[in-house]
Image: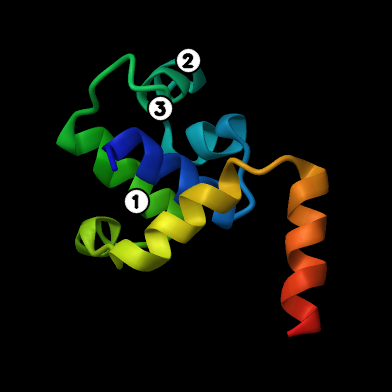
Amino acid sequence: MNIGDRIRILREKSGNSQNSLAEKAGVSQTHLRRVELGQADITVGHLQLICDALEISVKDFFNVNDEAEELSVAMANLTPKQKRLLIEFLKSI
């Protein structure tokens, strides 16, 4: 998992759009988008700003439970219909 993927996952979990997170963090939305897509690197300073906006520490940013993270990435890539079906399935068990 790269930093851009981790930012995207945490941003989506927090309910932020790229635009809203960029605004809260004081970074450009274009740069945030490029970082999430793996097209640009991020400085430690910008990562700190993003973590502050997400209300997490940089340590927590890198403290990843691999199994939970893998599941989170897989779920983030589902279509809306697939997400609904998965939720219905999980409720049934």
| Spot occupied by residue 87 in the image (x, y as percentages of width and height) | 76, 67
Q: Is residue 17 above or below residue 62?
A: above
The answer to whether marks 3 and 1 mark residues whose Cβ atoms lie closer than 8 Å is: no
Q: Is residue 79 above or below residue 62?
A: above
Q: Mark 3 or mark 1: name the one nearer the start of the chain.
A: 3
Quadrant of the rendering where the C terminus is positioned:
bottom right
| Spot occupied by residue 78 in the image (x, y as percentages of width and height) | 66, 43
Helix, strand or loop status at disc 2 = helix
Q: Mark 1 or mark 2: name the one nearer the start of the chain.
A: 2
Three-letter amino acid code of the residue under disc 2: Thr
Residue occupied by mark 3 = 27
In the rendered image, the residue lying farthest to the bottom is 93
| Spot occupied by residue 63 in the image (x, y as percentages of width and height) | 23, 64
Three-letter amino acid code of the residue under disc 1: Cys
Tell me: 49 left or right of 82.
left
Q: Which residue appears at 60% of the width and 37% of the height? A: 20
Marks 1/2: CA–CA distance: 18 Å
Q: Which residue appears at 59% of the width and 29% of the height? A: 19
Q: Which residue appears at 73% of the width and 62% of the height? A: 86
Location of residue 13 (image quadrant): bottom right
Three-letter amino acid code of the residue under disc 3: Val
Query: In front: mark 2 or mark 3?
Result: 2
Rendered image: mark on residue 30: 2
| Spot occupied by residue 50 in the image (x, y as percentages of width and height) | 37, 43
Count residues near mark 1 (Cα–Cα under 10 Å), then give few for <14, some for 14-19, many for 20+: many
Rendered image: mark on residue 51: 1
